[in-house]
Image: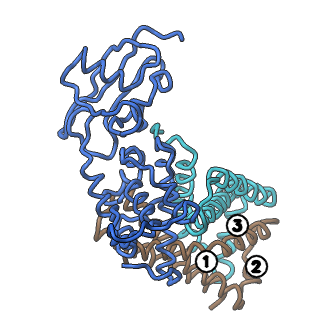
Amino acid sequence: MKAHRRQPLYLAFLLHRLSGLGLALFLPLHFYVLGLALGGDAAFDRALHWTSGPLFKFAEFGLVFLLAVHCFGGLRLLALENLPWSNRQKNYAAIAVAASVFVACGFLLRAF
Amino acid sequence: MQTSESITVKVWRGNADGGQFADYEVPHRPAQTILDVVTWIQRHADPGLAYRFACRVGMCGSCAMTVNGSPRWTCRTHVNKVIDGNRLTIEPLRNLPVIKDLACDMSAFFDKWNRAEGRFVGTATREHPVAAISPREPARRAADAAIECINCGICYAACDQVGWQSDYLGPAALNRAWSLQNDSRDRNHATRLRAVTVAGGCQQCHSQQGCAAHCPNELNPTASIAGLKRMATAGFFGFARQLDD
Amino acid sequence: MTDFRLYIAQRLSAAILAPLVLLHLGVMIYAIQGGLSAEEILARTRGSLLWGGIYGLFAIAVAVHAATGMRNILREWARLREPWLALASWAFFGGLLFAGLRAVAAVVGW
């Protein structure tokens, strides 16, 4: 990584942007699968059976992490831009990541 | 301190049309700064090397260059602090067009300063009493936190958004705008708020804080820009007090 | 839309999405145990005005938020210029809005 970017809040930005991009690209697939229910429960159910494999569960774990980290990081940004300035941005960014790992692991534990 | 005899310095040589790196072997001396290195090269290796400096004591900001990938004041950067093995790479500031070698064209930087209305506009005259502003007032403290900018351009060079979006006003211009928005003597608040919310305005900042990480005066333009966003958002939803202008 | 209006749209949609996403995370963690099945999911969502309303709002907000976010990425990283930038962004918004509301209709049974 270029030298001037090797600082934590650039990584926080990168994580926020890449998680958002990942989620945005996932959404059409998500909406497609849900939309299968229009064709009756069976079509929807068949698609959901794909999600029972362990590889899928890890993929879902990844998605849950992306959603959580984008949400918690986003809350940090909403606070940064609308509340009085805090110098603890690096701390909050770290807490956001930690909380996201916690949430994603909670999902993983229940998935198996 | 144990120092190796010489350091290998890669210096970017060229102009607006392009260029390449040239290698120089520079004697390594104790307490040597990057500016010392560049000066040695110009005096002993190649008098044609173009670079800027003025005060050489960390007050003017003229000597800002890219050192091993990061924008720094070269007069305040000790070789021993940044040397990579025994190699150094020195380039002109990022995000600004090059005039020659290590000297870049700061026009765009100052154009954006003007576009952001980075000028004080007052109506008081010598007949008026001095404005009574307590140093403890919140607005004064907000301005104080941002006011020490000497427009060296390091934040502008460190900002990725400046590189990604050509019309982005940049951290320095927006930081100055914020300090002026907090100056109760200024009479340009409404116009300035409009100026910093145009295309390329404060809303383009993604809060990476590269500016704050590199500012030699330890300013935080991201914090100033966040203040501008707050002001502009409040104004958008009608929560702001009526701005003069 | 002006740049600043797009910024407001993105932050506003973000503020709306925050509680909805937290709810959605909770729902996912609850629902994943024992695997996912159409029967379990649809039994709760079919005919539900509440879920329809919540996820309908979710779909609209996410279309705004994802499209404005994507616009930034297309402009800053893909260096897209007008009119392609506007075209791509509005197309993404329209596509997500349609697909999202369709998905809500599908699980609510409208």
Element type where label 2 sits in the image: helix
Within-10-Å neighbours for mark 3: few <14, some 14–19, many 20+: few
The chosen color scheme is: by chain
Quadrant of the image for the N terminus of chain C? Answer: bottom left
Q: Name the residue under label 1.
A: C16
Q: Which mark is residue A49?
A: 3
Instruction: Give the letter of the chain under mark 3.
Output: A
Residue type at numbered disc 2: Glu
Quarter of the rendering containing residue C81: bottom left
C99 in relation to B205, above or below: below
Instruction: Answer left or right for C10 relative to B165.
Output: right
Q: Which mark is residue B4?
A: none
Question: Spatial distance from mark 2 to mark 1, Cα to Cα?
Answer: 29 Å
The chain coloured brown is C
Residue type at numbered disc 1: Ile
Asked if one can make out residue C98 in the rendered structure from this viewpoint, the answer is no
What shade does chain B have? blue
Q: Earlier in the sequence, mark 2 or mark 1?
A: 1
Q: Where does the image place residue A36, in percent across and percent down from the top left? A: 60, 78
Question: Spatial distance from mark 2 to mark 3, Cα to Cα?
Answer: 12 Å
Instruction: Give the letter of the chain under mark 2.
Output: C
What shade does chain A have? cyan
Q: Name the residue under label 2.
A: C39
